[in-house]
Image (cartoon, helix red, strand yellow):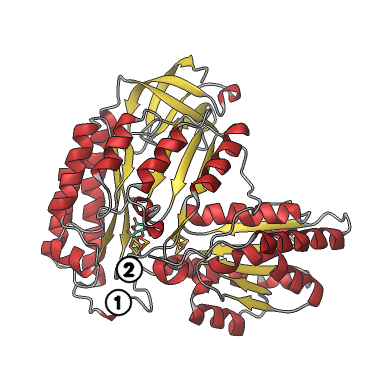
Amino acid sequence: MADRNVKISKQNIEKQKEFMLLIKKNLGGKKAFAHVETYGCQQNVNDSQRIEGMLLEMGYTLTDNREEADVIIFNTCAVRENAEMRVYGNLGALKHLKKKNPSLIIAVCGCMVQQEHIAARIKAKYRHVDLVFGPHTLWKFPSLLFDVTEHKERVINISGEGVIAEGIPVHYDGGAKAFVSIMYGCNNFCTYCIVPYVRGRERSRDEEDILNEIRTLSQSGVREIMLLGQNVNSYGKDRGETDGFSRLLEKVCEIDGIERIRFMSSHPKDISPTLLHTMAQNEKICNQLHLPLQSGSNRVLSEMNRNYTAEKYLETVKLARTLMPDIALTTDIIVGFPTETEEDFTKTLDILREAKYDSIFSFIYSRREGTKAAELENVATEEEINNRFQRMLDVQNALSYECNAVHEGKIEEVLVEGRSKTDEHMMTGRNYANKIVNFKGDDSLKDKFVKVKITKAQTWILYGEIIEILDK
Ligand code: SAH
Ligand code: SF4
Ligand code: F3S
């Protein structure tokens, strides 16, 4: 069982609050802008909301515009090389801003810089970066920033182990949907993946801390919650509990005002029949499941250290569909894992057809320094891998369309997000399956539940007509 003394003490959090006030005092009422740019997954988005929450308490005004910012923060991702390349490219582009405004503070945080070789590279080659901190030191951001602003030091701090910090202010965007991290880190060490190295071991937040956060969100108008973790099925296991996640879900269902609950990600090796039953029994838990498959070949799954077989995975899918016939399934697939052969790849295509995913998130394998798979030889050429990737998209696009067509003619509840970005005459929202639904309507519908009759399906989107505004 993991060490449970991972929670940062109240006194230490209070100290950080003092630093926030000090920075505010030093700004002296002068208008100062902060710009936070987020790369990577929803957990990183949630971390950025904490960084923004702290910046607001320090007296900064948030801006989308790098040019007017006094502080720029890149919250980075390490999961694939292209995510890191984008950060380096964008960091390079900040050089001219720093030249124009030498008092500009540039910070880089998140998973990418938790890797020592990257922190060292930024220290040596990106001299215009003032502050570097990792996911484990995020809670100390106020004191680190204070050292930069007041002591004019360059600060690189990626020390520390996995921690849980409660009581950090969070900046929500005010919409009807919110992310809530329920656990941090990962114990699974899939051989291709960097996450366990940069995020540390699994640790679950206390149930009351999570529920209180959701109650507060509900009071401020949030109706849909996405519970986040690298493997939510492990929630509570670090405390020796079993089925802790199912129990947590049931408690979240009891919170008034929260109408929809989603979660991600679920690891197929840990998903339990209990969880599927809990989903089926509670109306507030959306019949939607993201269940990353990665590969359909048992040999590759074993090399990936995924700890399940394709057959076991399909059994889970079958049970989910029996209990929830309308369930929407999505997955993650990696194409071009080092030892993947054409035969292995064909098995992945077979499962796509058999599981019939509503949509997939597909990635070309990216070699991550320090992981086990980084030692393996590639057997396929880049061209072969690109070709596999394209074939997979072709297969999946047809399946996605078929899955969407099932919704045609149905009347579904949609939580409205706002105006469609692609068509300003349309409002846009999501149905229970987390599918985008566009329909004609006006701004007054934003953040409301409406009933929409689905009239047309396309591969990526559903269209419909509003039937009724729901008073939920
Ligand atoms: N914890 C989550 C996944 C987090 S990373 C889970 O296990 O479901 C999100 C996705 O990125 C993974 O599911 C995987 O498909 C992909 N991924 C991770 N490492 C990768 C790598 N080295 N190359 C390509 N894709 C990768
Ligand atoms: Fe990475 Fe595997 Fe952990 Fe997901 S479960 S974060 S893929 S190591
Ligand atoms: Fe997320 Fe990327 Fe880190 S996927 S956990 S931000 S490496």
- Reading the chain from its start, which is encountered first: label 2 or label 1? 2
Left or right: 143 with respect to 260? right
Residues at marks 2 and 1, CA–CA distance in whole angstroms: 9 Å
Q: Position of residue 322 (x, y in %)?
A: 19, 33
Q: Position of residue 192 (x, y in %)?
A: 31, 69
Please tell me in which quadrant of the rendered image residue 67 appears: bottom right
Point 38% across, 46% down: residue: 245
Is the residue marked 1 within 8 Å of ligand 2, measured from its CB?
no
Helix, strand or loop at label 1? It is helix
Question: Residue 407 or 323: which is nearer the viewer?
Answer: 323
In the rendering, which numbered label is found on residue 372? Answer: 1
Contact between labelled residues 1 and 2, with CB atoms less than 8 Å apart: yes
Examine the rendered structure and indicate whether residue 315 appears above or below residue 55: above
Which quadrant is home to the N terminus? bottom left
Helix, strand or loop at label 2? It is loop
Q: Position of residue 152 (x, y in %)?
A: 78, 77
In the rendering, which numbered label is found on residue 189? Answer: 2
Residue 387 visible? The answer is: yes
Q: Residue furthest top?
A: 467
Q: Position of residue 7 (x, y in %)?
A: 55, 61
Is the residue marked 2 within 8 Å of ligand 2, measured from its CB?
yes
Question: Which three-letter amino acid code belongs to the residue tagged 2?
Answer: Phe
In the rendering, which numbered label is found on residue 316? Answer: none
Can you tell which of label 2 and label 1 is closer to the viewer? 2
Point 24% across, 78% down: residue: 376
Examine the rendered structure and indicate whether residue 286 appears above or below residue 383: above
